[in-house]
Image (spheres, rainbow, N blue to C red):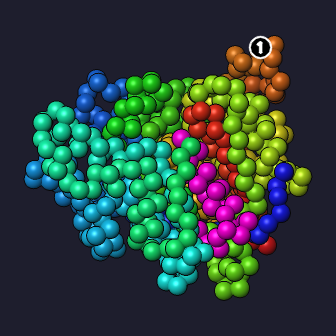
Amino acid sequence: MQLSGRKVAVVGMGGAFPDCTDISDFSEKLFAGKSLIREWDKAVAHGKNIRSVVSGFITETEMNLEAIYSTLAEDYPETYIDKLERIPDANLSTADIGSIWSMLGSLDAIKMAGWTDGETQSENTGVIIGSGGAGHVILRSAWHNFFELGKKTRMAGSHTVDRAMVYRDAANVSCLIKNKGVCESIGSACATGLGNIGYAYRLIKFGLQDRVIAGGVEGTSLETFIGFDAMQVLSRGFSPQESSRPFDASRNGFVCSFGCGIVALEEYEMAKARGANILGVIDSYFNNSDGDGDMFYPSFAGQKRLWKGLLGDDGLKPDVVKVHGTSTPVGDAIELLSVVDVMGESGYHISAPKSQFGHMLGAAGAVEFITALLMLKEQKVLPCLNSAKLNPELEGFQKTANWAGPIKPIEAYRNLLPQQSFTKEINRVTCLNYGFGGTNSAMTVSKDA
């Protein structure tokens, strides 16, 4: 049930996106149906020790950054140089690469929002940004130099803690923009990005903050990549552009990618009064847990309860459902059937942005929320790229006695899964994201009336 409270507007956005110069380039490539997934040279360099070698990765050069490596500790990026001088050196010294992306995305979102320094630095402005993992690149080098090479702790410099702590992204952004309100991080695996935006929405809705910079990030890290590769859940056997294939019958895993999505949220009446460009209005947010005790397997019942909580008494259904759509064999099937169970078999379309840039983990929900805003702006549906052939047979779990969902094969819903972007009147988009541990998040955003 949705409780009453203030309306929340989205007034700015920014971030870091694979193989893109900025958010305009990101939008243009997405609606042109392009894939941002490439073969990753750092994965290829490890030969047969890594099974998957494709990713939506981002390099320092692409972000106009340069890593400055320590002369005392092996392979340790001691700090970074911002070639465009967007971030002061003092702030760069406390940040890992993901935190730098968060700061850049926050600056872009604030600029788009049109907030003054007084508004940004207010007690009524918060920062809520989370990541799926720790500062792996920083930790790897620090621990290797100490444990394996026998060097003194001070060889890693004095910023290992602040560059690797769990809430480093929020902390670095807060120190950069000097807000005096809330500064927190929420971690909920692959639901992190949307979860942080959802928490920020609630802070504004119930009067605890007037403005919040919110989102999620996952900095490029081989450590993160090899962890999932070890689980044998990453896509392999396809060209880079064809590797992420939500709902396709031949999908065999997700593409591990990296990025950052940041949005500026503001109490609606305040935004309206100052003439802000409102990108979207958040209608509702809901999150829950599956409650079945399974760390990895998706829950049809949990997702149905998620929809029930999101729709509440109003029952306002979207024109587009932006799905989690990772390209995992069971996950995609459960999700599609749970959407159909609630939404029916027609009258809407399904968009799977991961088909174009892969799974950004902690950043996924935030970057994909930005794609929902872009769909509202462009009045175009983003595709389910590579969903060329859908399973004509029932899924294994649909044949079990306790299955209570739709009893048609995935192929029956071909009409819901566009393979190319197309124009359509879009007034409302629902975003879905799920994470390990059975955590689920859902948010609906609409055009400003």
Tell me residue 147's x, y (percent).
19, 34
Residue at disc 1, secondary structure: loop
Tell me residue 419's x, y (percent).
62, 43
Find out whether residue 75 is within the magenta segment.
no
Residue furthest to the left in view is 71
Q: Main secondary structure of the magenta part?
A: helix
Tell me residue 49's x, y (percent).
29, 24
- Relative depth, front residue between 420 and 280: 280
Give the amino acid at mark 1.
Answer: Thr
The correct choice, above or below, for 313 with respect to 116 in the image is: above
Residue at image coords 12%, 41% = 151
The reply to whether residue 310 is in sight is yes
- Relative depth, front residue between 305 and 380: 305
- Relative depth, front residue between 123 and 356: 123
Residue at image coords 23%, 56% = 158
- Relative depth, front residue between 195 and 121: 121
Q: Which quadrant is the C terminus positioned in? A: bottom right
Q: Which quadrant of the figure has residue 79?
A: bottom left
The correct choice, above or below, for 105 with respect to 352 in the image is: below
Query: In the drawing, does residue 132 fall left or right of residue 87?
Result: right
Residue at image coords 44%, 39% = 256
- Crowd around label 1: few <14 · some 14–19 · many ≥20 (10 Å): few
Residue behind mark 1 = 400
What is the span of residues highlighted in magenta in the rendered image? 189-212
Query: In the drawing, does residue 55 fall left or right of residue 285?
Result: left
